[in-house]
Image: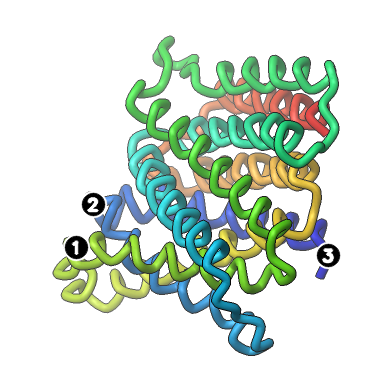
Amino acid sequence: MNWILLTLAAAGIEAISNVFDRFFLKNDTKQPDSLLGIWGVFALIMFCTPALISQTVSLDSTVILFGLLAGAIYILAMHFYYQAIARAEVTRIVPILSLGPMIIVVGASLFFQEAHTILQFIGIGIILLGMTIEAFDNISHKFIARQAIIFMSLAAILFATKNLLAKGLSLESSNPLNVLFWVGWGVFIFSLPYLFKHRKEVFRARQKLQVNFCLAAALAASCTMLYTSATLIGPAGLVAFLHRIEIFFVFIIAQVIDYRHPKLLKEKFNKKAFWQKLIGVLLIFIGSFFLM
């Protein structure tokens, strides 16, 4: 599977994951970090299995060290992501992740000699405008929770840092699967404190809640593996741009749910807000195009 298919698959699954995370955190648990421990277990399984099957695991100390570091950064990014999702409408908060592609494009041009033009700066400005439009609630005439914005911005920065680190590792290692293997171990190791802290909520929950825990973790781990794989084998800037189609998917899924079943996400459908969000999404995607 090439990097384009991997990126599109990651975008689709991540959109479903974003919406499901919002549902889960608003209805089933008040502890966002309780998801991190289970997510670490699924990440370990999904990241490590391909390398074990293909027998491509190596003990290169550089790859091990930086793979573990990437895993630690990813856990911290997911911590801020879950905190943000729990505090704001998914259609307004997820677009802030568009900070990530801007960081990746600049970083890729600096460290991996990928293209860097004046159009990219124009794209950055358009993305920031789209994010501002998304974050402003035209119903209450104020921006969404400042804490949510800060948390998601930190998550975007950390996600981008992890992807640049993984890209650098793929250039140092002859096999991307080996990089994924050690990133998976890093995610798992640094998720253990969260798993221990929230063990009672996770393992003593009713069966339906345990199923939702596993589903949320599996979705997060799946899109993580697909997107990281795309970053390893494809041009970082193009992968970052193409992955922005995720916000379209989030917008469509969440708006349909809000219109038909507003209690699921604890968000109300509003026609005026619908058009505002659509304009913000379009601006972000246009700006992302200029980052290519």
Q: Circles 2 and 3: CB distance less than 8 Å?
A: no
Q: Residue furthest top?
A: 141
Is the Cβ of the residue at disc 3 closer than 8 Å to that at disc 1?
A: no
Q: Residues within 10 Å of mark 3 (few under 14, many from 20)?
A: few
Mark sitting on residue 31: 2
Amino acid carrying mark 1 in the image: His
Q: Amino acid at mark 3?
A: Asn
Q: Are there few (<14), some (14-19), or many (20+) residues within 10 Å of tag 1?
A: some
Q: Quadrant of residue 284?
A: top right
Q: Residues within 10 Å of mark 2 (few under 14, many from 20)?
A: some
User: Residue 70 in the image: x percent, y percent?
Assistant: 50, 54
Q: Is residue 68 above or below residue 252?
A: below
Q: CA distance from mark 3 to mark 1?
A: 38 Å
The reply, left or right, for residue 143 in relation to residue 270 is left
Q: Of all residues shown, which one is farthest toward the front?
A: 61
* Residue tagged 3: 2
Residue 124, by quadrant, is top right
Residue position marked by numbered label 1 in the rendering: 198
Q: Is residue 190 left or right of residue 29?
A: right
Q: Quadrant of the C terminus?
A: top right
Query: Could you tell which of marks 1 and 2 lies nearer the N-terminus?
Result: 2
Question: Residue at (80%, 48%) from the top-left corner?
Answer: 235
